[in-house]
Image: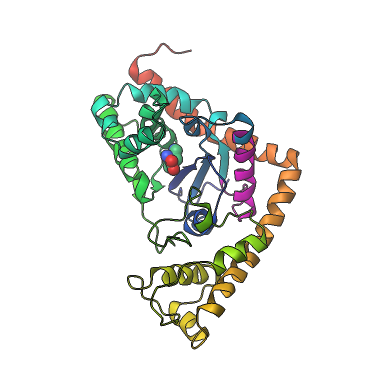
């Protein structure tokens, strides 16, 4: 640790191990994380505690948590330079989560659109955890005095609430929490479904979704079937509102190769979609090949993986502990 350099800003994010990672996660999030390694002091965790707000098969949850961690590393996230951990390994999350529930209003939680959506989707299991989930998410963020939380559209409301909770708590007890800012990505690729380019690529639409661990043949098939446009122009041209499917494929290709849209248009001038779609597929296959090999290698090395998440949890709990101790004192708990 060099203590002469000015402290870096803290960036934190969690991803739920609720499904297999896909190209949208990689190009839209993980790739940016890798690029931010040096700029920030980064904390990334597998949000397994959030995941059980919806019923899970235990063996699958365990497998996906480890697999997700292995994939982050395989995607280039260096565990020596980023703190990677599993949420449930740092018990301060649960502890601060409870406290913050007592500083979150019923009315606020009732207005969360994700709660409304999820309780409709899982009407047989509208449990209290699903309802108070934003308080736990606030704890995740506030424990680390995070400066920035990279947020997508779907998590904006939760981040707003986190700020409100932090401000409310600080107003009562003094400056306990850093009030985090949402971090808007620079050009962050927003990858859409290959089958339906008006909705985001999502694991719940497997035909339009390319998983990071998917076989090359399956990837190629999905790209060959990708929706382009309904006109007969058959021309690779960047026009998102007219040709959203083509624009999406160009976005993927650009994000992987670093080529500009103009360069891509030139490359495929006069060639049509029949050449373009498999070329994007090939580029994706070649990008994922080393990631897949590295994931397999890491997953086979149990001792290495265990070492990564244990060290990560230790580093994380060092910060988490400091914040929690302060909070316990402020609210009036007797010191242990
Ligand atoms: N709620 C986020 C999601 O569903 C995951 C998450 C949990 C998270 N805790 C977080 C994201 C803290 C950012 C910061 O995607």
Q: Residue at x 48, y 51 (%)?
A: 205
Secondary structure that dominates the magenta span: helix
Q: Quadrant of ligand 1?
A: top left
Q: Was residue 232 drawn as part of the magenta stretch in this picture?
A: no
Q: Residue at x 52, y 25 (%)?
A: 91
Residue in front for this viewpoint, 258 or 318: 258
- The answer to whether any part of residue 30 appears in the image is no
Q: Say if 27 sits above or below 278 in the image.
A: above
Q: Position of residue 202 (x, y in %)?
A: 47, 51
Q: Position of residue 169 (x, y in %)?
A: 29, 28
Quadrant of image for the N terminus:
top right
Q: Say if 95 sits above or below 231 in the image.
A: above
What residue range appears in magenta? 61-82
Q: How many marks?
A: 0
Residue in front for this viewpoint, 81 or 255: 255
Residue in front for this viewpoint, 25 or 199: 199
Q: Position of residue 322 (x, y in %)?
A: 46, 28
Residue in front for this viewpoint, 308 or 258: 258
- The answer to whether any part of residue 207 appears in the image is yes
Q: Residue at x 41, y 82 (%)?
A: 233
Q: Was residue 65 drawn as part of the magenta stretch in this picture?
A: yes
Which quadrant holds residue 288? bottom right
Q: Position of residue 48 (x, y in %)?
A: 53, 34
């Amino acid at each position: 640790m060099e203590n002469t350099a000015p402290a870096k800003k803290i960036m934190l994010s969690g991803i739920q191990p609720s499904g297999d990672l896909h190209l949208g996660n990689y190009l839209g999030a993980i790739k940016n994380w890798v690029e931010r390694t040096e700029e920030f002091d980064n904390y990334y965790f597998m949000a397994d505690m959030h995941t059980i707000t919806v019923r899970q098969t235990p063996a699958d949850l365990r497998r996906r948590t480890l697999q997700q961690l292995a994939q982050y590393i395989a995607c280039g996230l260096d565990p020596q330079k980023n703190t990677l951990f599993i949420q449930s390994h740092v018990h301060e999350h649960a502890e601060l989560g409870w406290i913050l529930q007592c500083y979150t209003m019923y009315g606020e939680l009732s207005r969360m659109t994700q709660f409304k959506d999820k309780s409709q989707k899982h009407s047989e299991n509208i449990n209290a955890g699903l309802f108070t989930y934003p308080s736990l998410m606030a704890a995740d963020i506030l424990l680390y005095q995070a400066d920035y939380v990279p947020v997508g559209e779907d998590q904006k409301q939760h981040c707003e609430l986190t700020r409100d909770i932090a401000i409310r708590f600080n107003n009562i007890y003094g400056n306990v929490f850093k009030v985090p800012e949402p971090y808007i990505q620079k050009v962050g690729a927003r990858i859409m479904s290959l089958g339906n380019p008006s909705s985001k690529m999502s694991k719940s639409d497997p035909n339009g979704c390319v998983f990071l661990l998917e076989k090359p043949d399956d990837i190629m098939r999905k790209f060959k079937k990708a929706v382009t446009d309904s006109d007969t122009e058959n021309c690779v041209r960047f026009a998102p509102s007219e040709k959203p499917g083509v624009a999406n494929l160009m976005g993927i290709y650009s994000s992987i190769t670093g080529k500009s849209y103009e360069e891509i248009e030139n490359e495929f001038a006069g060639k049509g979609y029949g050449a373009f779609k498999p070329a994007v597929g090939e580029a994706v296959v070649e990008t994922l090949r080393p990631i897949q090999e590295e994931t397999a290698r890491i997953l086979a090395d149990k001792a290495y993986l265990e070492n990564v998440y244990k060290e990560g949890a230790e580093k994380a709990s060092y910060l988490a502990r400091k914040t929690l101790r302060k909070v316990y004192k402020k609210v009036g708990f007797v010191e242990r």
